């Protein structure tokens, strides 16, 4: 096997491993294994979901002075804070637990200039079955940066584009 | 429809039908949302001529537009031709609004400026002056807050707000630069009757320790006591107070610098800001408000559906969408004199605590939804509910307007909220609606 072949083979391994990582984190989150999920992120992870508005394509208004703001703008510490709350046993809205299932698709993995970092695009659907017949669905696009640290792919950055101009649920006790 | 039996101020009893019956909701649209001053927009959201916001007054959709002469006008967001929604964007800047259906076009001052095929199809016989946008009867501004009123006979905004202005100014007028809303609108589809979230914030300190226990636990490492350092000379901790009897407006006030700033991971810059500016505020508002209120947690409710919370720094409106649904709109709010890093920190922390994924906000949704759902059953709807905690335990408090109950845990404010609800729903016009500002400071000179 020459160098190119081995390089291509490594790339295939990486693609496979990254796709697995996406599915694994969906399974961990569905199963509320939040600490294990957090371990699949880097120490400097940035986890964001921007606030947005519906505006005309040709709108001329000035940018908002303090910025648009974020629904999530989390460091690893802040993610840990959210997890601490969810695992406290006092989040009444999650007890009984809701049925939550994630579907991850449209996965596209693009190399960056740094060999051990990959951009990963995906789409996530989160289905929540709440009390009785009440169901809620979140749909979002994700643009991630994944970094290989000691042979393991870890989430280093996630920008989530939520495709709802009005949030269709009264809490977002879920990670995307 | 008589609402006299649906609430009793003396006992705090209310019928559960007020959260579910469609006929009562329709009455509210007419007599509360059709009559009260409703928040439309903040000056800071539409700074430039042509800036606009699409919002709601009750279930009526309105466009709020900054005019060339800096004034603000508001119009029903409906084309006067066939009734189509005129503007479909949330906000923006425009010279004109053009309807998607047939292309009728309206200028920022509401005039019908363009009708396609005016000559060919209308034979130039259309009187464009008769088909301008329908204006909201009254638009008035108080310290940056733009309100609209559908009722031309309503009292002035200033009279409507009454002594609540004394408390409002602790946020709106403490610093010379005024205030702004920050960030995009945080919109949530919320299946609750509009009165439940208002009640939850206007006076209900009771639920904090239990409903928000998980969030409290998560943020418990944050330094609550340290925050008071720069903000008050008071030696002991005041219990806080529930203020009502102000034309249906209410304030739930922590005092002496106890506030939601404590939930911020690093409140030090705020303490510094408060320390540096308290003398200015004292000069502007006097020592009582500068010492006891500025920098403290205030839950201010302007009847019927506006709440602003200095300390947690969020600003919220509930748009009713039927007896069992609201669209909840929230913004972060800042003082314009704050340094930029503090403004950013506020936007950040407001989202973390009371945004759509807020650590605290996410505890309230299911409770208020379920209170609403539980008012629908045939037998359940015949039940009464009570807001009778600390009934009879209120009094004047020297130096503060309003009828005041000590502490943050009572149902004093809620009772006054429902009293105003009843006064408005049972009155045929503003002439029959009492105006009252209990224990007014101005009365005593």
Image (tube, grey):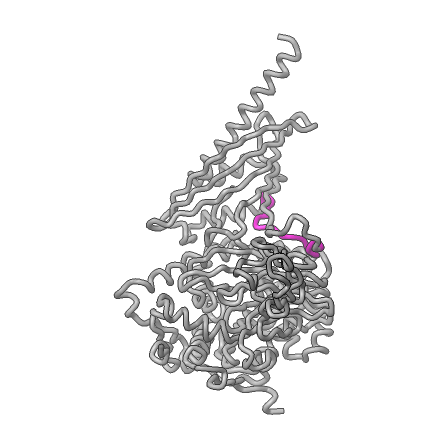
Height in image: A44 above or below A90?
above
Height in image: B149 above or below B347?
below
Front-most of A78 and A133? A133
Front-most of B200 and B50? B50
Image point (57%, 67%), residue name: B308
Height in image: B17 above or below A13?
below
Residue A116 x/y as whole percent: 64, 27
Residue B240 in sight here:
no
* Number of callouts: 0
Image point (70%, 63%), residue name: B47
Residue B204 in sight here:
yes
Magenta range is: A62-77
Does the magenta run of residues contain B92? no
Does the magenta run of residues contain A74? yes
Q: Quadrant of residue B139?
A: bottom right
Image point (63%, 77%), residue name: B289
Q: Quadrant of residue B76?
A: bottom right
Residue B99 x/y as whole percent: 59, 56
Identify the residue at the far top of this view: A1
Residue B330 x/y as whole percent: 56, 60
B429 relative to B144 in the view: left or right: left
B22 relative to B243 in the view: left or right: left
Residue B221 x/y as whole percent: 55, 55
Front-most of A78 and A47? A47
């Amino acid at each position: 096997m020459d160098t190119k072949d081995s390089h291509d083979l490594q790339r295939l391994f990486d693609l496979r491993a990254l796709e697995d990582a996406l599915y694994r984190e969906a399974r961990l989150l569905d199963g509320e294994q939040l600490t294990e999920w957090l371990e699949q992120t880097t120490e400097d992870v940035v986890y964001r979901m921007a606030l947005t508005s519906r505006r005309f394509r040709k709108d001329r208004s000035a940018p908002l002075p303090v910025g648009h703001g974020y629904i999530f703008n989390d460091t690893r510490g802040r993610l840990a804070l959210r997890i601490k709350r969810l695992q406290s046993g006092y989040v009444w809205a999650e007890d009984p637990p809701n049925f939550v299932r994630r579907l991850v698709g449209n996965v596209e993995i693009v190399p960056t200039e740094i060999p051990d970092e990959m951009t990963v695009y995906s789409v996530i659907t989160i289905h929540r079955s709440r009390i009785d017949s009440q169901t809620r669905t979140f749909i979002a696009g994700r643009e991630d940066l994944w970094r290989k640290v000691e042979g393991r792919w870890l989430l280093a950055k996630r920008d989530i584009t939520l495709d709802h101009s009005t949030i269709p649920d009264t809490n977002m006790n879920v990670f995307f | 429809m008589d609402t006299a039996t649906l609430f009793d101020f003396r006992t705090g009893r209310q019928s559960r039908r007020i959260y579910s019956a469609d006929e009562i909701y329709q009455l509210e649209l007419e007599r509360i949302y059709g009559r009260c001053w409703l928040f439309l927009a903040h000056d800071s959201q539409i700074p430039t001529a042509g800036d606009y916001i699409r919002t709601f007054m009750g279930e009526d959709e309105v466009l709020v537009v900054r005019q060339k002469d800096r004034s603000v006008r508001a119009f029903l967001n409906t084309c006067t031709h066939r009734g189509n929604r005129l503007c479909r964007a949330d906000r923006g800047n425009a010279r004109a609004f053009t309807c998607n259906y047939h292309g009728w076009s309206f200028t920022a001052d509401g005039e019908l400026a363009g009708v396609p095929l005016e000559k060919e199809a209308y034979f130039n016989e259309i009187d464009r002056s008769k088909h301008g946008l329908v204006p909201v009867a009254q638009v008035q501004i108080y310290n940056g807050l733009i309100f609209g009123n559908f009722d031309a006979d309503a009292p002035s905004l200033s009279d409507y707000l009454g002594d609540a202005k004394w408390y409002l100014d602790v946020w709106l007028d403490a610093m010379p630069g005024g205030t702004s809303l920050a960030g995009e609108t945080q919109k949530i589809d919320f299946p609750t009757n509009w009165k439940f979230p208002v009640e939850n914030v206007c006076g209900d300190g009771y639920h904090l320790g239990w409903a928000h226990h998980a969030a409290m636990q998560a943020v418990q490492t944050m330094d609550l006591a340290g925050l008071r350092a720069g903000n008050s000379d008071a030696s002991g901790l005041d219990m806080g107070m529930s203020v009502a009897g102000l034309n249906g407006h209410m304030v739930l006030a922590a005092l002496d610098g106890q506030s939601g700033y404590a939930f911020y991971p690093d409140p030090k810059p705020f303490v510094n800001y408060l320390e540096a500016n308290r003398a200015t505020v004292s000069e502007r508002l006097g020592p009582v408000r500068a010492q006891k209120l500025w920098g403290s947690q205030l839950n201010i409710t302007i009847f019927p559906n506006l709440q602003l919370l200095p300390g947690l720094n969020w600003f919220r409106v509930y748009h009713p969408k039927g007896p069992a649904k609201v669209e909840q709109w929230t913004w972060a709010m800042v003082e314009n004199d704050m340094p930029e890093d503090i403004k950013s920190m506020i936007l950040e922390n407001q989202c973390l605590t009371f945004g759509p994924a807020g650590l605290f906000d996410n505890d309230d949704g299911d409770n208020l939804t379920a209170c609403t759902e539980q008012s629908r059953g045939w037998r359940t709807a015949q039940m009464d509910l009570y807001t009778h905690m600390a009934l009879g335990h209120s009094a004047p408090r020297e130096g503060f307007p309003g009828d005041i109950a000590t502490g943050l845990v009572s149902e004093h404010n809620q009772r006054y909220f429902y009293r105003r609800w009843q006064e408005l729903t049972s009155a045929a016009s503003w002439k029959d609606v009492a105006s009252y500002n209990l224990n007014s400071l101005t009365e005593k000179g």
